[in-house]
Image (cartoon, rainbow, N blue to C red):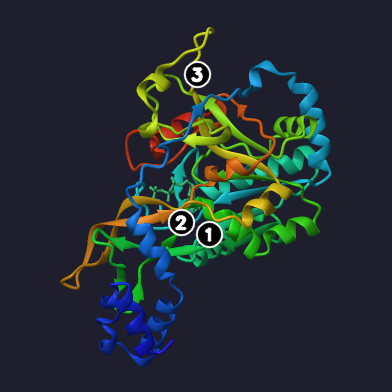
Amino acid sequence: MNFDDCKILLEKHGQEHLLKFYHELTQEEKDCLLSQISKIDFELMDSLYKNKDVFEIEDKEISNINAVDKQRINKEKYEELGIAHIKNGELAVCSMAGGQGTRLGFNGPKGTFMLDLKEPISIFEIIINKLKDAYRQYGVLTYWYIMTSIQNHDETVKFFEENHYFNYDKEHIIFFNQGELPLLDETGKIAFKDKAHIFMAPDGNGGIFEALKCEGIISHMKQHGIKYLAIGNVDNILINMIDPILIGLMVEKNVELAPKSFMKPSPEGKWGVLCKMNGKLGVIEYTETPKELREARNEEGELVFGDAYLGCSFFDIDLLERIAIKKLHLHAASKKNIVLDNMENKKELNTYKFEAFIFDSFSEAKDVLVFRVNKDEEFAPIKNKEGDESPKTAIELYKKFYQLD
Ligand code: UTP
């Protein structure tokens, strides 16, 4: 697209400010800016801004789910079955590591964040240690797919290169990029990172499905006989993605999706909970859950809407393929980002970021089970710099579980 075409397009969508610095740029920067503009779906951005405040669960009928509780099943039976499938190389794992980690305030890929355990160790190395354990137990090298964003891809790969892939087989660690969308400022204008670059941000963890397909990961899985993919947040240092009990359950019960949950210790816990929305599995945010639902208890005294989503789900490959061609809803999140302000200074401002959520895909599954695990065994998230779900609390949980110190 040339300058004049871009100008017409931008005027149509009220985004003409994107050419404001054009004449100050070098020829290379000018070409690059026009190319960035030509890739943006302006109709989509208009509609996202227009609908940013639409309350998503309105009109949906909410009902409870019945989770399979790990404490109440014959673990040995399912474990044995699951191990056979794992030994057959049917399970791969995938870490979603494309997030910006704005709350943590760490200026790098979250997986490279260093924690002070016995010795300093990165989140990525903690995960790889689990893959090595699985190799020792089952004699299989598990494929590890790592979803990065275009912004943090190179730094992530460099980190692995510099650390010699932590002595894991390099061929079994595969990076792929998720998509991205422009950030909008509070008035709906596309934000600048600097005078030559539009501020693009990753399209949310729900961007994973399109990325798995477009980046050739689903094909790779097929070529290698992989039937199940455990997808998890990179920022949970107790995450258990190689879980033979759950694989055994999925096989035995013939389900194509199995998200993990843990029981909220009290109605106040601010996690999204698994529920049915119009009869289909979904996650409802704490803020959107009416008080009477949050506090409802069954005859055994358990919270009826108590299964918090743990940030880890097992998908079978057919389901992944079906979801990959669907368009998931894009939610608006208000996040602070350092953008160019009106005075052309870099400043931390409120922006709108548009994100798809992985759990919005759950409604596509025909047969599902929610696997309720013990929170202390599988959940030590790192979200915030301090306070709840910070590196400090995650380390405490990790040490408690592994009985370190
Ligand atoms: P969060 O929703 O906690 O987002 O991601 P975040 O980007 O890490 O942190 P904040 O909200 O900016 O503070 C849950 C998981 O999804 C991944 C994250 O890396 C984390 O593992 N994620 C999130 C992506 O891979 N891509 C995204 O676009 C967003």
| Point 41% across, 67% down: residue | 43
Q: Earlier in the sequence, mark 3 or mark 1?
A: 1
- Decide if residue 252 is on the left or right side of residue 94: right
Q: Which residue is mark 1?
A: 148
Instruction: Give the spatial CA distance, label 1 vs label 2.
Output: 8 Å
Q: Is any part of residue 403 visible from this angle?
A: no
Q: Earlier in the sequence, mark 1 or mark 2?
A: 2
Q: Position of residue 48 (x, y in %)?
A: 38, 58
| Point 36% across, 22% down: residue | 291
**Label 1 Cα neighbours within 10 Å, binned few <14 / some 14-19 / many ≥20:** many
Q: Using the image as rendered, state which of residue 312 and residue 134 is in the foreground.
A: 312
From this viewpoint, which residue is outermost toward the front?
A: 59
Q: Secondary structure at mark 2?
A: loop
Q: Which residue is mark 2?
A: 109
Instruction: Give the spatial CA distance, label 3 vs label 1.
Output: 36 Å
Q: Which dot, 1 or 2, sits closer to the camera? A: 1
Q: Is any part of residue 38 visible from this angle?
A: yes
Q: Which mark is residue 304?
A: 3
Q: Using the image as rendered, state which of residue 327 and residue 253 is in the foreground.
A: 327
| 5 shown above or below 304 | below
Q: Position of residue 44 (x, y in %)?
A: 42, 64
Q: Using the image as rendered, state which of residue 136 and residue 331 is in the foreground.
A: 331
Instruction: Give the spatial CA distance, label 3 vs label 2.
Output: 37 Å
Q: Is ligand 1 less than 8 Å from the beta carbon at label 2?
A: no
Looking at numbered disc 1 in the image, what kind of residue is underneath it?
A: Thr
Looking at numbered disc 3 in the image, what kind of residue is underneath it?
A: Val
Q: Is ligand 1 less than 8 Å from the beta carbon at label 1?
A: yes
- The reply to whether discs 1 and 2 touch (Cβ–Cβ < 8 Å) is yes
- Decide if residue 242 is on the left or right side of residue 197: right
